């Protein structure tokens, strides 16, 4: 089954332990796999503490790479000021990593950051799948507190939390899943129970590979319309892309 036009909703730029990816190499991988546009966020120290450098990296990449910027909620007003700066640089969303940045999604310090992102019309992706901070249920509770903002469960709780998604999705309409690291059976279950509008294709380069994710997606029992939602329509709608 041909995927047609595709938007990668979760790529990473920078350096983190053994992982390294620069914008020019991401573009090469996109071209090799027919990816039209990628949404990229920082990783490593540029995600944990050196936010300005990481945000500059993703927002100043070539136009086919759009920036998901990040700040640490503990930085308070400085974090809000950085989000203002990133808006002016053309960022399209916010990425938070509770485990790396040292907070619980349900803590009050997160609300001003979410509120500012909501003011900008940004969706918010949170890393999920690492105990205890990056718990799916905590992200779901944050989404309940902010029903007008779209939230994406980054990595879909991979590996040990994905089973929480089907029940959570039934009660949290503004929560979506990023399928960049998750198994096909989990995607099919969400689509069957909650429709194809709740899943976003992601490559997770450089942690995963486009070839792996696209092969998995190609084996899913989806209609052409459902497949198009997954690989293109949902990201275009949620991130308000042209």
Image (spheres, helix red, strand yellow):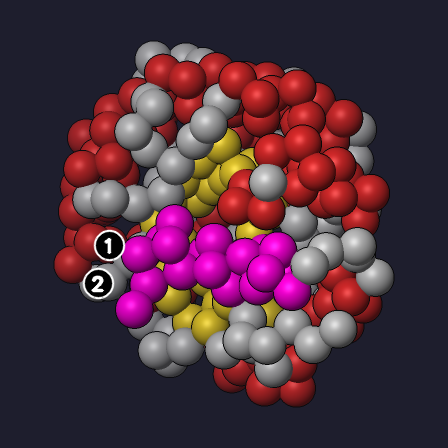
Identify the residue at image location x=74%, y=67%: 214
Q: Image check: 171 left or right of 219? A: left
Give the image quarter of residue 75: top left
| Span colored in magenta | 224-242
Residue displayed at 38% across by 66% down: 66
Mark 2 lies on a secondary structure that is loop
Instruction: Identify the residue at image location x=67%, y=32%.
Output: 193
Sort mark 2 into few (<14), some (14-19) or many (20+) by Cα contacts within 10 Å.
some
Question: Does 37 appear in magenta?
Answer: no
Magenta-drawn stretch, dominant element (helix, strand or loop): helix
Say the numbered circle drawn on residue 89: 2
Counting from the top left corner in percent of width and height, residue 133 is at: 59, 22
| Label 1 sits on residue | 86
Q: Position of residue 236 (x, y in %)?
A: 40, 60
Q: Position of residue 151 (x, y in %)?
A: 44, 35
Compared with residue 170, is residue 55 higher up or lower down, i.e. above or below? below
Q: Is 184 situated left or right of 147 in this image?
A: right
- Residue 30 visible in this rendered orientation of the protein: yes
Q: Are marks 2 and 1 in contact (CB under 8 Å)?
A: yes
């Amino acid at each position: 089954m041909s995927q047609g036009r595709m938007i990668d909703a979760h790529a990473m730029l920078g350096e983190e332990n053994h992982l390294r990816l620069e914008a020019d190499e991401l573009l090469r991988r996109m071209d090799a796999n027919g990816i039209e546009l990628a949404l990229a966020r920082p990783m490593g120290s540029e995600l944990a503490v050196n936010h300005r450098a990481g945000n500059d990296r993703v927002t100043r990449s070539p136009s086919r790479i759009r920036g998901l910027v990040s700040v640490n909620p503990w930085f308070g007003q400085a974090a809000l000021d950085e989000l203002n700066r990133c808006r002016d640089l053309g960022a399209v969303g916010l990425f938070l990593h509770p485990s790396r940045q040292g907070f619980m999604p349900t803590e009050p310090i997160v609300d001003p950051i979410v509120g500012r992102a909501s003011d900008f019309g940004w969706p918010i992706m949170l890393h999920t799948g690492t105990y205890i901070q990056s718990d799916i249920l905590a992200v779901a509770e944050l989404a309940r507190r902010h029903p007008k903002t779209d939230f994406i469960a980054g990595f879909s709780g991979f590996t040990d939390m994905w089973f929480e998604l089907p029940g959570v999705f039934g009660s949290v309409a503004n929560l979506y899943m990023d399928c960049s690291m998750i198994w096909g059976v989990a995607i099919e279950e969400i689509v069957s129970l909650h429709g194809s509008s709740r899943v976003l294709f992601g490559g997770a380069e450089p942690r995963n590979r486009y070839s792996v994710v696209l092969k998995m997606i190609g084996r899913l029992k989806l209609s052409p319309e459902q497949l198009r939602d997954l690989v293109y329509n949902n990201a275009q709608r949620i991130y308000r892309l042209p």
